[in-house]
């Protein structure tokens, strides 16, 4: 609880190792279990909470001022929050932003998501870094009644993300068209009325801002569910195929996604572009393997080096699994690496317009150093037509 208060705690975060953090609950009362990660971004808490890649996870925000920009439906990456809950240092602040239409706490309550404030997030973050992303139970009870043993047992009962296919849970139920471009002053989101390239985007948990970046790069986007077959993808006669971000264990999602990608690669010369889980799916289809990371990469300030140009990009990241660069086959080139830990952040096929990156170049939230990747994808489709 905040220093100097005698209030009874109304929320409890229990780690599987028995550690308990008590604080002040907000959002919707209840209990949930998940993997706990931390995110270092200084802005974009709403985009983070609604990013489908956070399915099965509770997010600790290392930046203390959460809530100060309020909430607006314009910033949702999908209809509802996908992250199971949030952990913050201070109670969410009152919104002070002309675009805000709602307070964060009221929004979380209406969406059935739990928050806990008054937590020593530095201590928690150090624990995650040192011991790996823990399994946790998060409970909010306005009366402050908690059974600590029961919560620890619930945390230990969480099965974890290894072997878990979560893409099926967050993908679209049916195909749809997308033509909305990136937000621009003063009109906000505008449609692309003259797209040049037909793109099929396979939705493993796609963020809306990634689809907007495709539209802004001149793409007429048709979004298909994660389980789409190669026949269903190619039936749209696309100029290129995009593989989206998403949650869970890539090896589990790969059970059905990898055969589709392999068939597209073997039967066509289409440009293929993947982001995040889409990057991992492409790597698996090309013969590489993926591994679970200790605590993953989650933030908007991750330096990545581009081997092709020597440039360093500051990127937005959210992943708990990574492509094992030692497993890349001969014809696949490692294009980008993390300057934090040397892990793989990008690949391309040596002689084809097939490439992917681990990070989020649409950067919502985050820097926009990497938008060129969407333009590269568009240029590859243009070159194929020519």
Image: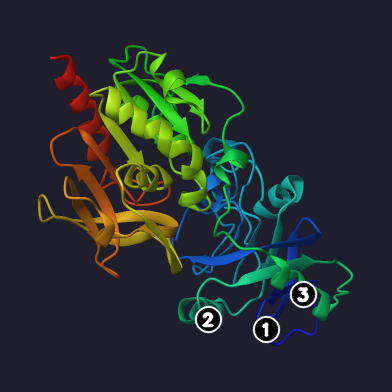
Contact flag, marks 3 and 1 (Cβ < 8 Å)? no
The residue shown at (25%, 53%) is 328
Residue 376, position as x, y percentages in the image: 20, 33
Label 1's element? Answer: loop
The residue shown at (11%, 50%) is 308
As drawn, is 257 to the left or to the right of 167? Answer: left
Residue 371, position as x, y percentages in the image: 27, 40
Quadrant (top left/top right/bottom left/bottom right) for the C terminus: top left
Q: Which residue is mark 3?
A: 153
Quadrant (top left/top right/bottom left/bottom right) for the N terminus: bottom right
In the image, which is nearer the foreground, mark 3 or mark 2? Answer: 3
Q: Which residue is mark 1?
A: 19
Looking at the image, can residue 74 be seen?
yes
- C-alpha distance separating marks 3 and 2: 19 Å
First reached walking from the N terminus: tag 1 or tag 2: 1
Can you tell which quarter of the image residue 76 is in?
top right
Query: Which sits in the foreground, 183 or 282?
Result: 282
Task: Give the label on residue 127, or none.
Answer: 2
Label 2's element? Answer: helix
Can you tell which quarter of the image residue 13 is in?
bottom right
As drawn, is 123 to the left or to the right of 374? Answer: right
User: Which residue is situated farthest in the left direction here?
Assistant: 309
Residue 91, position as x, y percentages in the image: 66, 67
Q: Say if 27 sits above or below 117 in the image.
A: above
- C-alpha distance separating marks 1 and 2: 10 Å
Query: Which sits in the foreground, 128 or 85?
Result: 128
């Amino acid at each position: 609880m905040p220093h100097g208060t005698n209030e009874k705690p109304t929320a409890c975060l229990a780690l599987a190792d028995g550690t308990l953090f008590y604080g002040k609950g907000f959002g919707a009362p209840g209990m949930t279990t998940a993997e706990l990660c931390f995110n270092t971004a200084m802005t974009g808490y709403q985009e983070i909470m609604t990013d489908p890649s956070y399915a099965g996870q509770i997010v600790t925000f290392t930046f203390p001022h959460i809530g100060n920009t309020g909430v607006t439906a314009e910033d949702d990456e999908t209809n509802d929050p996908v992250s199971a809950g949030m952990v913050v240092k201070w109670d969410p602040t009152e919104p002070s932003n002309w675009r805000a239409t709602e307070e964060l706490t009221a929004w979380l309550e209406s969406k059935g998501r739990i928050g806990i404030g008054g937590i020593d997030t530095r201590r928690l973050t150090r624990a995650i870094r040192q011991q790996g992303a823990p399994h946790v139970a998060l409970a909010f009870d306005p009366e402050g009644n908690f059974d600590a043993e029961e919560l620890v047992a619930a945390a230990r009962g969480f099965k974890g993300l290894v072997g878990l296919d979560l893409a099926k849970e967050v993908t679209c139920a049916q195909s749809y068209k997308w033509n909305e471009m990136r937000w621009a002053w003063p009109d906000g989101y505008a449609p692309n009325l003259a797209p040049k390239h037909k793109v099929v985007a396979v939705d493993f948990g796609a963020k809306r801002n990634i689809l907007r970046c495709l539209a802004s790069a001149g793409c007429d986007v048709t979004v298909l569910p994660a389980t789409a077959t190669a026949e269903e993808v190619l039936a749209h006669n696309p100029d290129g195929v995009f593989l989206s971000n998403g949650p869970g264990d890539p090896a589990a999602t790969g059970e059905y996604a990898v055969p589709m990608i392999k068939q597209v690669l073997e039967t066509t010369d289409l440009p293929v572009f993947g982001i995040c889980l889409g990057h991992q799916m492409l790597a698996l289809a090309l013969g590489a393997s993926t591994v679970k990371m200790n605590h993953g990469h989650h933030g908007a300030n991750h330096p990545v080096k581009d081997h092709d140009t020597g440039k360093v990009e500051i990127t937005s990241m959210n992943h708990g699994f990574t492509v094992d660069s030692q497993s890349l086959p001969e014809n696949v080139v490692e294009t980008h690496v993390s300057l934090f830990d040397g892990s793989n952040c990008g690949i391309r096929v040596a002689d084809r317009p097939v490439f992917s990156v681990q990070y989020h170049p649409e950067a919502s939230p985050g820097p926009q150093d990497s938008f060129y990747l969407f333009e590269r994808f568009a240029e590859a489709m243009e070159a194929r037509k020519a």
